């Protein structure tokens, strides 16, 4: 069965603790933390996401799925590694080859799973050399930086490519899809080969988290 990583980007601060509790009760598999710096992407969510991540560490044992959409990856690693999340994902586009290798090593040395993300128009070929060393590949199925966007259909080809490549090379990374995923799009994303669905607006805006979670996971 596919796993769900619920993006809490659009959760209102005044409702946050209650919302986190309800998402856990609804059986989300991860809390997805969208860290943006206002440079790599337009929005800046650093303060809000750190507050949410710290709060979650105090009230739940569910894994944190950290997604760094930032230019200065090294600085944000220093901030998030002490929280010991399940995994930290950074963007290939944020650094040069040697930097990417260093960030992978740093995350691994701290006992955290490594995720590598690519934007919709970044070719899969550009990350092949790193795939034996990561645990998760995150495919942005919308342009990063904003919630509530429509899934870009051509990104499904990237998920398929990554699925075929891991089978051919006998690699065991998980494929995570992020952006525009809802009840209408989730089947196509899973069919393409995704193992983890990042669901944001569709979940947070649902009247009943448990029912929405059940439907997202159903028949996948």
Image (cartoon, rainbow, N blue to C red):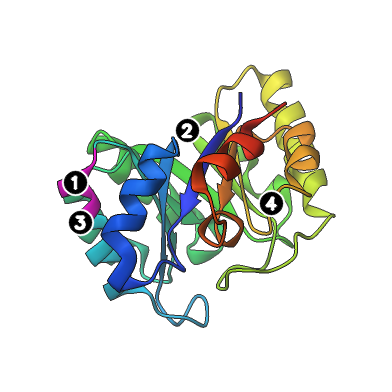
Q: Mark 2, residues whose alpha carbon is within 10 Å: few (<14), some, or many (≥20)?
A: many
x and y percentages locating residue 169 in the rendered image:
67, 20
Q: Which mark is residue 182?
A: 4
Ranked by sequence position, the earlier of labels 4 and 1 is: 1
Task: From the image, state whether disc 4 or disc 2 is nearer to you.
Answer: 4
1 and 3 marks in contact (CB < 8 Å) = yes
Q: Secondary structure at mark 3?
A: helix
Q: Is residue 28 above or below residue 99?
A: above
Q: Does the magenta segment cover residue 56?
A: yes
Main secondary structure type of the part rendered in magenta:
helix
Magenta stretch bounds: 54-60
Q: Mark 4, residues whose alpha carbon is within 10 Å: few (<14), some, or many (≥20)?
A: many
- Report the side of 20 relative to 184 (left or right): left
The answer for how far apart the CA atoms under marks 1 and 3 are is 7 Å
x and y percentages locating residue 63 in the rendered image:
33, 38
Name the residue that disc number 3 marks.
55
2 and 3 marks in contact (CB < 8 Å) = no
- Report the side of 133 relative to 138 (left or right): left
Which residue is most to the front?
A: 207
Q: Secondary structure at mark 4?
A: loop
Q: Secondary structure at mark 2?
A: loop
x and y percentages locating residue 214 in the rendered image:
59, 35
Q: Nearer the viewer, residue 192 or 81?
A: 192
The answer for how far apart the CA atoms under marks 4 and 1 are is 27 Å
Q: Residue at x 43, y 69 (%)?
A: 70
The answer for how far apart the CA atoms under marks 4 and 2 are is 24 Å
């Amino acid at each position: 069965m596919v796993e769900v990583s619920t993006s809490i980007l659009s959760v209102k601060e005044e409702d946050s603790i209650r919302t986190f509790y309800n998402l856990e009760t609804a059986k989300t598999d991860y809390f997805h933390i969208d860290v943006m710096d206002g440079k790599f992407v337009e929005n800046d969510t650093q303060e809000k996401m750190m507050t949410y991540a710290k709060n979650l560490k105090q009230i739940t044992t569910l894994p944190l799925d950290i997604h760094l959409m930032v230019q200065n990856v090294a600085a944000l690693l220093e901030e998030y590694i002490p929280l010991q999340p399940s995994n930290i994902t950074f963007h290939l586009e944020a650094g040069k080859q040697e930097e990417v290798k260093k960030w992978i090593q740093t995350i691994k040395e701290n006992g955290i799973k490594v995720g590598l993300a690519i934007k919709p128009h970044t070719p899969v070929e550009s990350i092949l050399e790193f795939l034996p060393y990561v645990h998760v590949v995150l495919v942005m199925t919308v342009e990063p930086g904003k919630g509530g966007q429509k899934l870009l259909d051509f990104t499904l080809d990237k998920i398929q490519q990554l699925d075929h490549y891991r089978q051919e090379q006998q690699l065991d990374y998980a494929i995570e899809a992020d952006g525009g995923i809802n009840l209408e799009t989730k089947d196509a994303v899973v069919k393409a080969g995704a193992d983890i669905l990042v669901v944001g607006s569709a979940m947070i805006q649902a009247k009943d988290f448990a029912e929405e979670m059940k439907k997202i996971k159903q028949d996948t």
